[in-house]
Amino acid sequence: MARRRRSALPRRPDTSNYGGLIEMRRCRATGTFVGLYDTVKADMDQDTPYATVCETHGQNAGHNTLSRARSSMAFPEWCEDCHPKLYK
Ligand SMILES: [Zn+2]
């Protein structure tokens, strides 16, 4: 079970103290911010080197490669709160 991040911000989060953050992007499909993290630097409980985090809902998913992580940022079906918005 991965650690959940506390965040529910309508605006771009202040990421200056987000350890391990590689990239933060707004998902066009859902309007939520999705962060891409180095799981080791971010001290996340994931067995993959990278993870994407829905900053709005606090859910995350692990990825083995940076390219897979990046492509999942645009389509966060791994967040169960965003999932319905992608398939409506
Ligand atoms: Zn979400």
Image (tube, rainbow, N blue to C red):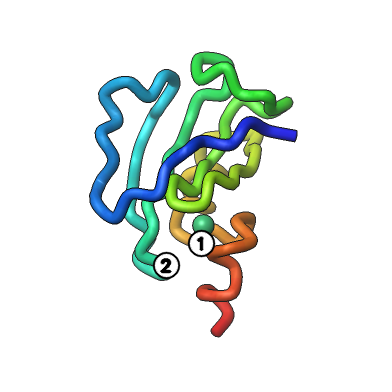
Q: Residue at x 63, y 55 (%)?
A: 78
User: What's under tag 1, amino acid-wise?
Assistant: Phe
**Residue contact at pointers 1 and 2, CB within 8 angstroms:** no
The residue carrying mark 2 has its beta carbon less than 8 Å from ligand 1: yes
Rendered position, 73 above or below 16: below
Cα distance between the residues tagged 1 and 2: 8 Å
In the image, 2 versus 61, the foreground residue is 2
Q: Indicate the secondary structure of the residue bearing disc 1.
A: loop
Q: Residue at x 51, y 61 (%)?
A: 75
In x, y percent, where is residue 88?
Answer: 55, 84
In the image, 19 versus 48, the foreground residue is 19
Residue that carries the numbered disc 2 in the rendered image:
30
In the image, 66 versus 55, the foreground residue is 55
The residue carrying mark 1 has its beta carbon less than 8 Å from ligand 1: no
The disc at residue 87 is none
Quadrant for the N terminus, please: top right
Question: Within 10 angstroms of label 1, few (less than 14), some, or many (20 or more) residues?
Answer: some
User: What's under tag 2, amino acid-wise?
Assistant: Thr
- Mark positioned earlier in the residue sequence (1 or 2): 2
Q: Is residue 48 left or right of residue 60?
A: right
In x, y percent, where is residue 68?
Answer: 57, 45
Residue 18, picture quadrant: top left
Q: Indicate the secondary structure of the residue bearing disc 2.
A: loop
Question: What number of labels is visible?
Answer: 2
Q: Going by the picture, which residue comes out furthest to the bottom?
A: 88
Residue 47, picture quadrant: top right
Residue that carries the numbered disc 1 in the rendered image:
75
Question: Within 10 angstroms of label 2, few (less than 14), some, or many (20 or more) residues?
Answer: some
